[in-house]
Image (cartoon, grey):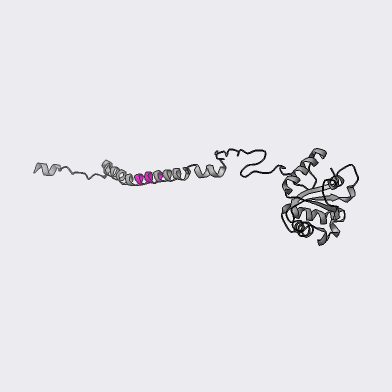
Amino acid sequence: MNSKSLLETGFSECYPLKSITFSNLPQDKSSVIVIFDQELSGKPESDILYIGRTKKPLKRILGGYLAGYGGKNTKKINEILFDQGYIEKASISWMLTDKPRIIQSELLEKFKKDHGDLPVWNTKKKLSVKLKGTTAFNSKKAPVSKTKVVTPKTIASIAPKSRPKAKAITLKKSAQKEDSLSKTEPTSKTETATEMPDKAKPKTELPSDKSMTT
């Protein structure tokens, strides 16, 4: 599959992108667009760089590929054209159709079948048409797991903060012990004061012999 085979299926003649004009382009008609590398024309490998579609080819080619306005893929092609020098060797062709999405998908599938991969400028996206709410390859939604991932932050927030509490309790107990000791000290002093030695007690004087004789 190359530019020659596409010309036989209804595509327009190839126009160099660097010299394309307003009068060469179709006016707001749905089209399939193909960009070629002129240096690969007639060689064994395919000269097709990109297969796309648009409802407004004039805006897409002049405002997008050449001026850099549009979506992500359009801007990417603009960068390749001017940053990598492809503007000097790239040409473009198109085919008007009422079903651009279907024609593009068929061309991409055929190119992949012939060459084993998509054209180098095409994004790696699904080729078949997406249905509402489903995809072409997997219509079932993947089950959402409800398991929570435990991280160090969540452990720290869940774990009880017991260490500061334990410290407060020990401090309180030590304070109570000190209070109890301070209260018991005066009693111990009085007890020692009452148990004085015999020397400190007053002596009772016995009557003398003289008072006894009288």
Residue sitting at the far left: 214
Percent position of residue 77, x then y: 78, 53
Percent position of residue 75, x then y: 75, 55
In the foreground, 27 or 131:
27
Percent position of residue 17, x then y: 84, 56
Residue at 78% over, 48% down: 51
Residue at 80% over, 52% down: 94
The quadrant the N terminus occupies is top right
In the rendered view, tell whether residue 174 sits above or below residue 59.
Answer: above
In the foreground, 204 or 114:
114
Residue 63, magenta (yes or no): no
Residue 178, magenta (yes or no): yes
Residue at 28% over, 45% down: 190
Q: In the picture provided, is 139 more to the left or to the right than 160?
A: right
User: Dominant secondary structure of the magenta stretch?
Assistant: helix
Residue sitting at the far right: 42
In the rendered view, tell whether residue 56 sits above or below residue 8.
Answer: below
**Quadrant in the picture for residue 68:** bottom right
In the foreground, 166 or 123:
123
Magenta span of residues: 174-181
**Quadrant in the picture for residue 167:** top left
Residue sitting at the far bottom: 22
The quadrant the C terminus occupies is top left
What is the total number of numbered labels drawn onto the structure image?
A: 0
Residue at 39% over, 43% down: 173
Percent position of residue 64, x then y: 76, 57
In the foreground, 77 or 159:
77
**Quadrant in the picture for residue 61:** bottom right
